[in-house]
């Protein structure tokens, strides 16, 4: 007596989700390694820092050599570095958030900016505009934010801490 058996394998939703998550994690790791390799020179020189934050990649740039105090115009000496970073951001792909951050010293005697909120947003917009013009970053994938002094990395009571808090952050979705 012969009996035919048909065996079907059904993967559960949780197994499919695990596979999707593993693939997403692998893609994020690949993108992170690519960015680290592309920006090795900038990282070594202390011009940029890169880290994984959840399912995103964060590139932090010090505002020290990128902008004059109280201004949102990019410094000429920073343009080469920013061009390299822009190329890497474009190659990485994905949604991009560019945010500006300041120290807690209020802006004084500025004809253009009423507050650190204005300044931080204008600096982030300057970086985004540079990427649009020089690196062909797709503007539909970019968001710009100004956080003023609301997300400090260091204590704002010292000049060194305030300098660390003045930065541009580029957050790339994994």
Image (tube, grey):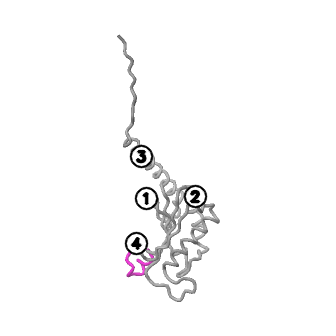
- Please, what secondary structure does the residue beneath circle 4 have? loop
- Front residue of 65/8: it is 8
Q: Please report the bounds of the magenta region as a residue range.
A: 152-164
Q: Are marks 3 and 2 in contact (CB under 8 Å)?
A: no
What element does badge 3 sit on?
A: helix
- Give the residue at mark 2: 90
Q: Residues within 10 Å of mark 2 (few under 14, many from 20)?
A: some
Q: Is residue 155 magenta?
A: yes
Mark 1: secondary structure = strand
Q: CA distance from mark 1 to mark 4?
A: 16 Å
Residue visible at 57% across and 69% down in the picture:
127
Whole-angstrom CA distance, mark 3 to mark 1, is 16 Å
Q: Quadrant of residue 8?
A: top left
Q: Earlier in the sequence, mark 3 or mark 2?
A: 3
Which-is-in-front pick, marks 3 and 1?
Answer: 3
Compared to residue 119, the image places residue 31 above or below, namely above
Q: Counting residues from the N terminus, which is met first, the one under dot 4 or under dot 2?
A: 2
Q: Earlier in the sequence, mark 3 or mark 4?
A: 3
């Amino acid at each position: 007596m012969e009996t035919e058996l048909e065996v079907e394998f059904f993967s559960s939703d949780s197994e499919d989700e695990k596979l999707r998550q593993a693939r997403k994690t692998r893609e994020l790791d690949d993108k992170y390694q690519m960015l680290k390799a592309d920006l090795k020179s900038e990282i070594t020189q202390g011009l940029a820092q890169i880290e994984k934050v959840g399912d995103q990649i964060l590139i932090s740039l010090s505002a020290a050599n990128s902008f004059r105090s109280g201004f949102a115009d990019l410094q000429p000496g920073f343009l080469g570095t920013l061009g390299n970073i822009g190329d890497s951001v474009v190659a990485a792909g994905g949604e991009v958030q560019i945010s500006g951050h300041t120290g807690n010293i209020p802006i004084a005697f500025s004809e253009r900016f009423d507050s650190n909120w204005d300044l931080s947003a204008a600096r982030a917009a300057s970086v985004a505009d540079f990427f649009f013009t020089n690196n062909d970053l797709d503007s539909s994938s970019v968001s710009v934010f100004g956080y003023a002094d609301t997300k400090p990395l260091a204590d704002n009571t010292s000049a060194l801490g305030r300098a660390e808090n003045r930065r541009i952050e580029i957050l790339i979705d994994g």
